[in-house]
Structure formats: structure tokens, C-alpha cells
Amino acid sequence: MDANKILTADFLDILFDGRNKEYGAYELRKNYTKRLTTALLVTAGVALLIFLAVIVSRTVGANSKEKVKVQDVTLSEVKQEEQQKIEPPPPPPPKQEPPKIEITKFTPPKIVEDEKFEEKNEVKEQEEITNVGKIDQEGIKDPEVVNPPKVEQETKVVEAPKEDENQVFTKVEVEAQFPGGEGKWNQYVQREVERHIDELTEDGQAGTCEVQFIVDKEGNVSNVEALTMKGTVLAQIAVNAIKKGPKWIPAIQNGRQVKAWRRQKITFRLPDEQP
């Protein structure tokens, strides 16, 4: 910068002499004062507008309020309606007991000696008797009115139906079972068949024999009878096996052990028929 211009030049011109003024920093510093003044003026204007708006709103609100007028109010007397008295309902009529009926005590006929006879025990004729009871009672003598029977007070105890000990059920909820279940039954039958295998083979009758019998409450077996293959060795062995076997588990009906029928099958195949 020339020496003659230094005294009249601005500080920014001296600071940015020989530098790139188009970079942006020069313009920002040069217009700083102008921008600051503009911002202050805008802020003051906004504040002034807000202040004026508050004053105007208060003035308008004060003018819009109406004055409250106080008027004298005269209260008129209100006549209360007389409450109607509710009369209590009339008491129920006294319970009237039914009229007493004349009752003549029943005297069973009895032959006594004349010296021991008492008139009060005399058997009256039927025409003189209106109602017969256990006591003598004075009252209305009307043949059409019958002395009501004495009803004993109900005890509300219902006697349970008596159980028939000899009843044999044909259908039950849980059938009688061989002790140990089907597995033990099969083992027991297999042992009985093996003991008599020679007799069964000689007889030559193979098949399934169904046996019917009764199992009582203690598990005892009775009335054993073969329903199929009657007269065969297999039927005889099946009946004897059930008769000589252990006690069974009784059947269950309504949660208790009962006496019931049971059917059980025993199957035998000849050696040449084995699969």
C-alpha cells in the first residue's frame, strides 16, 4: 500500500493489504458493524411490538368487562306440603285353632269278671261313637267331621337303600382282574397249558375257550363254567385253572367292591399250527 494512503486507509484495508480479500473474512469484518446494528434494531422492534400487544390486550379486556349489578332479591315463603301420615298395616288376625272334635277312647274288648268291671272301660256301641282315638276329648259331635291324624315331626333323615349282598352284577365300571394284570394271567395260563401239553396234543382240539365265573367281594371264584369248546380237554384245563388259581381283584361299582360276573378266554394252538 502507498505511504500516502496509509493515513486515510481503514484498519481492515491495512490488515488485509496484499491478502486475498475475496476469501470471505474481509467481508465479514467489514460488514460486522452494519449487521450488528440491523440485528439490534430488529430485536428492539419485535420487543416493542410485543409490549404494545400486551398493553392493547389489557386495555381491550378491561373495557369488555361488564359491571355486576347487585339487585335486591325478595324471598317468597314456600309452603311445605304436609306429609301424609302413613298408617301402619293392621295386625294379622289371631290364629284360630281348629275346633276340638269329640273323641272317644278306643277300648279293646277284654273279658273280665263282673266284680272287676269298670264302666269307663265299657265297649260302647258303634252308633254312639263318632271319632275313635287314644284319649277321651270333649268337642263338636259331628259325624261328618273326622279327627285329623297326628303327624309326627319330620326328621329329614332318609334311610339309605339296603344293599343286596347276594346281587351279582353283569356290567360294572371296573371288571375283576387277575392279580398282577394281563401279563401275570398269560404267564399263569402258559404254565397250566405246558403242564397238560401231552393231553392237549392227544385230544387234538385247538382253539379259544371262553370261561364264565363269578368273583365275589373277597376275590373268591365260583360258578366256573366253560361257554365254548365244552367237553374238550382245553375246556376242562381252563375251568380247573380258574378254580385252583389265586384270588382275583374284585370288580368296582360306584366306588365299592361288588360281586360280579367275569369272562376270560384261554387260547391253545397245536405245535404244527404255531405261526
Image (cartoon, grey):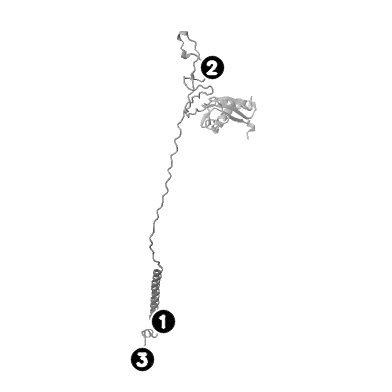
The residue that label 3 is drawn on is 4
Residue 17 in picture, x, y percent from top left: 38, 85
Vertical comparison of 189 with 42: above or below:
above
Q: Amino acid at mark 2?
A: Glu
Residue 237 in picture, x, y percent from top left: 59, 26
Which comes sooner in the sequence, label 1 or label 3? 3
Q: Amino acid at mark 3?
A: Asn
What whole-number distance in Å separates the C-alpha atoms at marks 3 and 2? 175 Å
**Camera-side mark, 1 or 3:** 1
Q: Amino acid at mark 1?
A: Glu
Vertical comparison of 114 with 35: above or below:
above
The residue that label 1 is drawn on is 27
Which comes sooner in the sequence, label 3 or label 2? 3
The residue that label 2 is drawn on is 127
Circle 3 SS class: helix
Circle 2 SS class: helix
